[in-house]
Image: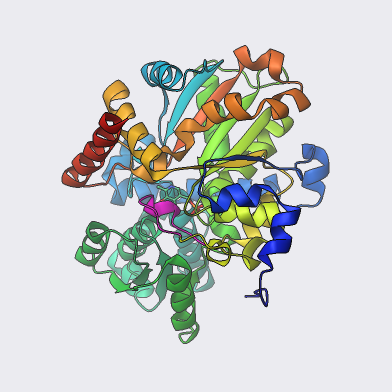
Amino acid sequence: MKELESIDLKILKEYYPLLEKLISLDELLWLNPSLEPFKTGINKCPLSQKDVNDAEERLKRFAPYIAKVFPETEKTNGIIESPLAEIPAMKQSLEQTYNQPIFGELLLKCDSHLPISGSIKARGGIYEVLKHAEQLALKHKLLTTEDDYAILDSQKFRTFFSNYSIAVGSTGNLGLSIGIMSAKLGFKVTVHMSADAKQWKKDLLRSKNVQVIEYEADYSKAVEEGRLQAEQDPTCHFIDDENSTDLFLGYAVAASRLQKQLEELEITVDEDHPLFVYLPCGVGGGPGGIAFGLKLLFQDHVHCFFAEPTHSPCMLLGLMTGLHEQISVQDIGIDNITDADGLAVGRPSGFVGKTIEPFLSGSYTVSDEELYKLLKELADTENIYLEPSALAGMIGSIKLYKEGSEYLQKHLLTEKMTSATHIVWGTGGNMVPEEMMKQYYQKGLDLMLED
Ligand SMILES: *Cc1c(COP(=O)(O)O)cnc(C)c1O
């Protein structure tokens, strides 16, 4: 990885006055000056709809296998998908709390309730494992793409896959997805966990025969170590959260699924009905892939915003300075310590940053305290329980209306907002143990009582 010799903070601050606010850990909204009309942006992009379609087809081939080995996916015929929910009571609560009307519809995409691993990582993470398994099986002539992939659920295939290993570095949720899926297929699997990773995630993985290696350091270190160890072993496939196009494409498949759900709810997205999507961002692959997929389908009618903790705004920093993976939040004196463990990433993916740059509308930061309060409020109003990271998108529409009028004016959206749809991407939470969730809720309650 390339790194700057040294970051001259004084010069950076002169160029990017917003940095001061970022360093002060104040919440802020940044609008992306590199946003381009879709048609010009896509011309520079090495990935296309064809790549996303290929990923979607692959997931369909695996559906009979998934339905067989994960019975909770039977009702969707082995397609791993989450509900899109209306959250009117939460909307009302947000409007009151922030004293700000939210024009348009507010919906929650419940990736928190994705089957198998209960987070957004059940998209990209599982997809990459499946793709790798397919490639190995095809290469060894054990499988053809015409077969019913349910045959993968057999001792023969598990024995075959046990000759290969898979490794990944993670703050927790990616490890869960990769670990559960790889172990199910029969792979040997090692998850390198950062210090943020929760104990219950490590315990769960170990109970499934996944090797878990723990680090005192943060996510970037866990990935680096994992990559190094995997390089020593030619039979090991390293799932590279910082650079993988497969992960990215697995996430991007979400877009066509969402399009169908919007149609079912009779929600239009077009010139006069803009769609706004707020995506919690860690290293960038999940939100980046989904935003990319959405731009391919809805082009200039969809407006994607990333959301990051005030203590881990790595993607915002990389995009704003144009330095991408060459700068980390630690370089500017931010500690990367947040309770939003899924977002506790100090250095962004350069691949995602550069790919998403022409398509992203903006990015904002949110404090941990705010995440807890939103967690409590969503539980009270809609009886939906998310993990702290997953609440980062919940404040997006408020940020947009309060601080983004320049964006709305520039894109001639101000008059159209009563016909807008806002989607909050709820990225995780369903697997959190009850006791832990109670503590999260209590924390939100305590913070509210302090106000
Ligand atoms: C991983 C994760 C994200 C962000 O995905 P990245 O690919 O790391 O940007 C958001 N929310 C939750 C709950 C996550 O686990």
Q: Residue at x 56, y 33 (%)?
A: 277
**The furthest residue to the bottom:** 232
In the rendered view, would you say 214 is above or below 134? below
Q: In the displayed structure, does residue 450 sit left or right of residue 271? A: left
Image spot of residue 393 (x, y percent): 48, 36
Would residue 344 be counted in the magenta stretch?
yes
Q: Which residues are magenta?
A: 336-346
Give the image's coloring scheme: rainbow
Q: Closer to the camera, 404 or 13?
A: 13
Viewer-proximal residue, 87 or 190?
A: 87
- Residue drawn at x 75%, y 54% is 15
166 over 92 or under it: above or below:
below
Quadrant including the C terminus: top left
Residue 442 figure quarter: top left
Which residue: 48% across, 73% down? 237
Q: Is residue 32 visible?
A: yes
Q: Residue furthest left?
A: 435
Q: How many marks?
A: 0
Residue 97 on the magenta span: no
Quadrant assignment, res 11: bottom right
Q: Position of residue 373 (x, y in %)?
A: 34, 34
Tell me if 59 is positioned left or right of 117 in this view.
right
Query: In this rendering, would 261 be left or right of 288?
Result: left
SS assignment for the magenta stretch, majority: loop
Q: Is residue 384 visible?
A: no
**Residue 110 % position (x, y):** 40, 34
Quadrant of image for the N terminus = bottom right
Q: Nearer the viewer, residue 198 or 177?
A: 198
Of the pair 140 and 372, the residue shown nearer to us: 372
What x and y, as percent, mark residue 48?
71, 48
When the figure is inspected, residue 33 is found, relative to residue 266, above or below; the finding is below
